[in-house]
Image (tube, rainbow, N blue to C red):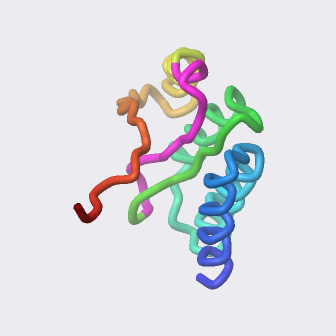
Amino acid sequence: MISENDRTLAAADALAAGDMKLMGKLMAESHVSMRDDFEITVPPIDRLVEIVKSVIGDRGGVRMTGGGFGGCIVALMPLALVEPVRAAVAREYPLQTNGLKETFYVCKASEGAGTC
């Protein structure tokens, strides 16, 4: 847990600096920790993370999100990579997961709620 807290603080700094290479490294470390230290990922999610990372390289990051044992990933990337990621996932994910299909939600980060 302490290493994840440290990564979260470092990720905030990386995002503020626009350092997507560092952000991607931190997200990869987080996913590995969830997989190896906490054993809460599942093979289909690990495959999805690998496919997305193979497309975005050091231009973004990807990791499992949520409570574990299935579910979702979050990926941060430039908008220009969304369609190449979609294409790679549509092509490779069903083959690597015995026919599982994905659902995409493309979002844009914002500051969120605040005070007036």
Q: Which one is nearer the viewer's eye here, 19 or 29?
A: 19
Q: Which one is nearer the viewer's eye here, 77 or 54?
A: 77
Specify whether 89 is left or right of 53.
left
Specify whether 68 is left or right of 20.
left
How many numbered marks are there? 0
Residue sticking out furthest to the front: 116
Q: Position of residue 57 (x, y in %)?
A: 75, 34
Specify whether 21 is left or right of 116.
right
Q: Which one is nearer the viewer's eye here, 84 or 50?
A: 84
- Up the image or down, 82 lies above or below 19; here it is above
Specify whether 54 is left or right of 79.
right
Q: Residue at horizontal 62%, vertical 71%?
A: 9
Q: Quadrant of residue 38?
A: bottom right
- Up the image or down, 96 lies above or below 38; here it is above
Q: Position of residue 50 (x, y in %)?
A: 66, 39
Q: Residue at horizontal 76%, vertical 38%?
A: 58
Q: Residue at horizontal 33%, vertical 53%?
A: 112
Q: Quadrant of the C terminus?
A: bottom left
- Up the image or down, 101 lies above or below 50; here it is above
Q: Position of residue 77 (x, y in %)?
A: 59, 34
Q: Residue at horizontal 27%, vertical 58%?
A: 113
- What segment is highlighted magenta in the picture? 68-82
- Up the image or down, 14 lies above or below 8; here it is above
Residue sticking out furthest to the left: 116
Is 63 in the magenta?
A: no
Residue sticking out furthest to the bottom: 2
Q: Quadrant of the N terminus?
A: bottom right
Q: Quadrant of residue 53?
A: top right
